[in-house]
Image: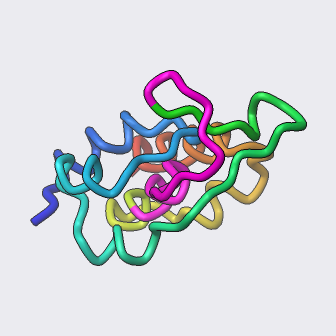
């Protein structure tokens, strides 16, 4: 079971831009239901570095995992934050995570 303390620690670990593989999510104590809901297949884009996926320092074309920003949303909701309100003006994935952290801090 995910505790409040562990959820807070995970939220601090999320940066917004990372992809977490399923096994890493399990090792971190993320509920299996969340993993099933959030896991997806991603493909690298090559127009910019932000679209490119790297795994263990190597460029990969495809990756199956959970977006850290989606996990941050789940964690924020779990911790009782009004995530929709907090992230309404956020313009990037990292800004979304930052807004969620601030909303949780205000609780």
Residue at point 60%, 52% (across, down): 62
Residue at point 63%, 47% (across, down): 96
Q: Is residue 103 above or below residue 73?
A: above
Q: Nearer the viewer, residue 19 or 46?
A: 46
**In the picture provided, is 52 more to the left or to the right than 76?**
right
Residue 31 location in percent, x, y? 23, 67
Quarter of the figure with residue 106: top left
Q: Quadrant of the N terminus?
A: bottom left
Query: What is the image's colouring?
Result: rainbow
Quarter of the figure with residue 36: bottom left
Quarter of the figure with residue 94: top right
- Which residues lie in the magenta part? 56-74
Residue 20 location in percent, x, y? 41, 47
Residue 11 location in percent, x, y? 37, 43
Residue at point 53%, 52% (across, down): 63
The total of numbered circles placed on residues is 0
Q: Nearer the viewer, residue 91 or 59?
A: 59
**In the picture provided, is 67 more to the left or to the right than 53?**
left
Q: Nearer the viewer, residue 88 or 26?
A: 26
Q: Is residue 82 above or below residue 59?
A: below
Quick check: is 70 in the magenta stretch? yes
Residue 8 location in percent, x, y? 28, 44
Residue at point 68%, 54% (across, down): 43
Q: Return the residue found at the far left.
A: 1
Q: Is residue 61 above or below residue 30?
A: above
Q: Return the residue found at the far right.
A: 47
Q: Return the residue found at the far top.
A: 57
């Amino acid at each position: 079971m995910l505790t409040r303390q562990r959820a807070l620690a995970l939220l601090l670990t999320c940066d917004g831009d990372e992809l977490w593989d399923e096994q890493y999510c399990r090792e971190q104590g993320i509920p299996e239901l969340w993993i099933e809901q959030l896991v997806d297949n991603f493909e690298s884009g090559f127009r910019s570095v932000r679209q490119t996926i790297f795994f263990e320092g190597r460029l990969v074309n495809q990756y199956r995992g959970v977006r850290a920003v989606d996990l941050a949303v789940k964690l924020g909701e779990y911790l009782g934050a009004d995530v929709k309100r907090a992230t309404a003006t956020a313009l990037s994935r990292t800004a979304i995570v930052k807004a969620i952290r601030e909303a949780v801090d205000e609780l």
